[in-house]
Image (cartoon, rainbow, N blue to C red):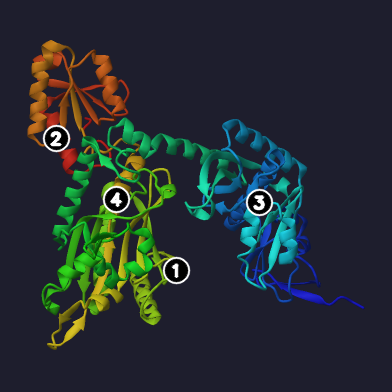
């Protein structure tokens, strides 16, 4: 009896006829030997699968090689299994947690008695090389729940995961050589296809991200198809270490987080406070110019306020516990929006009043889990660049255009490139889904009308409405969350935010929740890394340091420092120790300009100028010209020096 054939559809519209039971690997072989050698996985009817998975009749198949972006995730997931294989060979009793591919690589969590040492990481990487050399095939098998429990009877982490599978859910395991894991896949054909990888670090990680559970040991690594890409990535990681805001924050005396104060609570030192004040003053002045009203609200409020807003229903786990005052319960505010709503409804508003824009640099408090805290980038107390814009429904498109223009201006001032994304309804959304989805469609229309090539983030919206996210790219090519503009029909209904229309009837307002820069902590932490601590002149805590060659020229140097200060420049006079020591100290502090004054400069009314990053090079300038050029550079908020002749 002949085996029936199946028809396979290719991306270019062609079809292939193959025997039933054929796989994507057979498709590659049918097309040509070169593709058969290069193929790593396949996209079958929209799903990425292993090459050896049998195909159904009529399946659409696209083969993946190392030229396809989707293949990199498959490679990295496979690298995680190679890592686990090596760990199990070196530490046979290690419990196996999760091992996914992530944006820049992969990780695997292990339940082991002690944290991994650097020597162990080196040994594990060497054993991974042996696993690759062995070229074990990745073999997929479907098993029953009972069989899976027997296979993983010695691993409590896997047994817990198995208990969560729904009845009827397909359970698959993958084997590569001696290692067997519970896994959905897909994987590359064999371990030998993994050539360029590197283990990067080890850290503690709570099982399932729950700080109440046991601490596992996580090993991070990365993998690439091309050696040059891995070298480029590793170089970028080294640069990132040099720019780490926690390291630079200490070296430049910008901020600290101290155990006696508490985790996730930032202390701004004078230098950091100066940078923050400059950013905040610039932001406030810009907002006032764009029609915003500055408001201030308290740090705590009655719990009832957050019950009305819905935060207690969907956000309680991220809020600090309630404080009780004779039966009245208060919470530290997690967000500013309910407070702004109360200001709005303190008066009857007319349609002529709208748009009404309330802005606040308001301090909020979130109970971030200790394992998630990270310097200034993930904290428990933060000051949010926050605003709420109250509009009529017919003003939505115009107001979003204004917001996108303003966000574009601000990010260019700080030297960021960016892209936009539209985040749609999440599972925890409250209110009418049809209203939410209609709001998403309107925001998509705004972005399309501006010609923006935006990404769609399905399910990434706020619980009360969709949002436009601005994602900024820093000097190392890393992406950070920037501004976010959230459209809200729900909160106005909950809080009774109304206006009297031209028809003399009451109508419900629409609210846009918006932040342009995010929190000051996260934004300035990001700026430190973006600039590598070398702030442009207008943001630098100390803009110029005046250095007399010796004590006898201190008076002349002080006159120059006074002239700079009189023009509003942040200047310091340093006459300590030797000149070489003082120059080195200024370089270490990344001060944009040094002005050196000796006999020649004092007699001629000049100054020898050293610019940051110029090495030993000095230029002699007329003092008045030097003051004027620095003043102009600061006023222009220039990102690059313009003071050199």
Determine whether the residue tagged by mark 1 lies in a helix, strand or loop: loop
Task: Tell me where residue 462 sits by quadrant.
Answer: bottom left
Q: Position of residue 26 (x, y in %)?
A: 78, 63
Mark 2 → mark 3, Cα distance in angstroms: 56 Å
Residue furthest front in the image: 326
Left or right of 594, for residue 216: right
Q: Residue at x 62, y 54 (%)?
A: 157
CA gap between label 4 and label 1 equals 27 Å
Q: Nearer the viewer, mark 4 or mark 2?
A: 4
Distance CA(mark 4)–CA(mark 3): 39 Å
The residue under label 1 is 459
Mark identifier at residue 78: 3
For the image shown, how many numbered marks are present on the structure? 4
Does any portion of residue 604 appear in the rendered image?
Answer: no
Query: What residue is drawn where x is 7% and y is 33%?
Result: 566
Q: Is residue 248 above or below residue 332?
A: above
List x then y, in percent, for residue 499. Answer: 16, 79
- Gap between marks 2 and 1 measured at Cα: 48 Å
- Whichever of labels 4 and 3 marks the residue nearer the N terminus, that label is 3
The answer, for residue 207, to whether it is visible in the render is: yes
Q: Which residue is mark 4?
A: 381
> Is 221 rendered above or below residue 212?
above
Where is residue 16? Give x, y as percent. 75, 71
Q: Secondary structure at mark 4?
A: strand
Whether label 4 touches label 2, CB < 8 Å: no
**What residue sits 20% from the left and 76% below the top?**
497
The reply to whether discs 2 and 1 touch (Cβ–Cβ < 8 Å) is: no
First in sequence: mark 3 or mark 1?
3
Mark before the other along the chain sequence, 4 or 2: 4
Residue 493: image quadrant is bottom left
In this rendering, the label closer to the viewer, 2 or 1? 1
Q: Residues within 10 Å of mark 2 (few under 14, many from 20)?
A: many
């Amino acid at each position: 009896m002949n085996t029936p054939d199946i028809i396979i559809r290719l991306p270019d519209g062609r079809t292939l006829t193959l025997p039933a039971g054929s796989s994507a690997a057979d498709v590659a072989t049918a097309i040509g030997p070169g593709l058969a050698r290069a193929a790593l996985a396949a996209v079958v009817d929209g799903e990425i699968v292993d090459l050896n998975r049998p195909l159904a009749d009529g399946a659409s198949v696209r083969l993946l090689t190392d030229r396809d972006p989707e293949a990199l995730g498959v490679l990295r997931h496979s690298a995680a299994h190679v890592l686990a294989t090596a760990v199990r060979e070196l530490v046979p009793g290690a419990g196996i947690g999760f091992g996914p591919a992530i944006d820049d690589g992969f990780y695997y969590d292990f339940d082991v008695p002690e944290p991994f040492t650097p020597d162990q990481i080196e040994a594990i990487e060497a054993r991974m090389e042996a696993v690759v050399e062995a070229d074990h095939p990745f073999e997929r098998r479907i098993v029953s729940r009972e069989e899976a429990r027997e296979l993983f009877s010695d691993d409590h982490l896997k047994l817990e995961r198995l208990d969560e599978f729904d009845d009827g859910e397909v359970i698959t395991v993958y084997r590569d050589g001696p290692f067997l894991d519970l896994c959905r896949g897909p994987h590359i054909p064999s371990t030998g296809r993994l050539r360029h990888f590197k283990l990067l670090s080890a850290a503690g990680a709570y099982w399932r991200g729950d700080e109440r559970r046991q601490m596992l040991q996580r090993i991070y690594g990365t993998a690439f198809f091309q050696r040059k890409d891995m070298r480029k990535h590793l170089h970028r990681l080294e640069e990132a270490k040099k720019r780490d805001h926690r390291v630079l924050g200490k070296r430049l005396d910008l901020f600290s987080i101290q155990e006696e104060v508490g985790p996730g609570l930032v202390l701004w030192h004078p230098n950091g406070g100066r940078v923050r004040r400059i950013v905040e003053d610039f932001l406030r002045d810009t907002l006032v110019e764009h029609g915003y009203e500055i408001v201030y609200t308290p740090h705590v409020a009655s719990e009832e306020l957050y019950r009305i807003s819905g935060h207690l229903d969907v956000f309680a786990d991220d809020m600090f516990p309630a404080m009780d005052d004779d039966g009245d319960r208060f919470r530290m505010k997690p967000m500013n929006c309910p407070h702004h709503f109360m200001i709005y409804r303190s008066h009857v508003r007319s349609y002529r009043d709208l748009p009404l824009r309330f802005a606040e640099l308001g301090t909020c408090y979130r109970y971030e889990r200790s394992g998630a805290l990270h310097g200034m980038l993930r904290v428990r107390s933060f000051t949010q660049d926050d605003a709420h814009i109250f509009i009529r429904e017919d003003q939505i498109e115009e107001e979003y255009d204004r917001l996108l223009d303003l966000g574009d201006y601000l990010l260019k001032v700080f030297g960021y490139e960016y892209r936009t994304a539209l985040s749609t309804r999440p599972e925890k959304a409250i209110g009418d889904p049809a209203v939410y989805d209609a709001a998403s469609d309107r925001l998509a229309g705004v972005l399309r009308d501006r010609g923006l090539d935006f990404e769609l983030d399905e399910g990434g919206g706020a619980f009360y409405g969709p949002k436009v996210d601005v994602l900024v790219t820093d000097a190392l090519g890393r992406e950070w969350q920037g501004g976010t503009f959230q459209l809200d029909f729900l909160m106005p209904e909950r809080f009774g935010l109304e206006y009297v229309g031209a028809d003399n009837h009451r109508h419900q307002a629409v609210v846009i929740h918006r932040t342009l820069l995010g929190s000051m902590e996260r934004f300035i932490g990001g700026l430190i890394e973006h600039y590598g601590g070398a702030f442009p002149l207008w943001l630098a805590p100390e803009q110029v340091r005046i250095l007399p060659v010796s004590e006898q020229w201190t008076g002349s140097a002080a006159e120059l420092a006074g002239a700079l200060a009189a023009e509003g420049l942040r200047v310091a006079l340093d006459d300590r120790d030797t000149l070489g020591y003082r120059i080195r100290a200024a370089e270490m502090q990344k001060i944009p300009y040094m002005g050196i004054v000796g006999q020649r400069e004092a007699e001629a009314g000049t100054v020898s100028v050293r610019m940051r990053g110029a090495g030993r090079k000095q230029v002699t300038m007329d003092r008045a010209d030097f003051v004027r050029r620095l003043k102009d550079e600061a006023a222009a908020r220039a990102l690059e020096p313009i003071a050199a002749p």
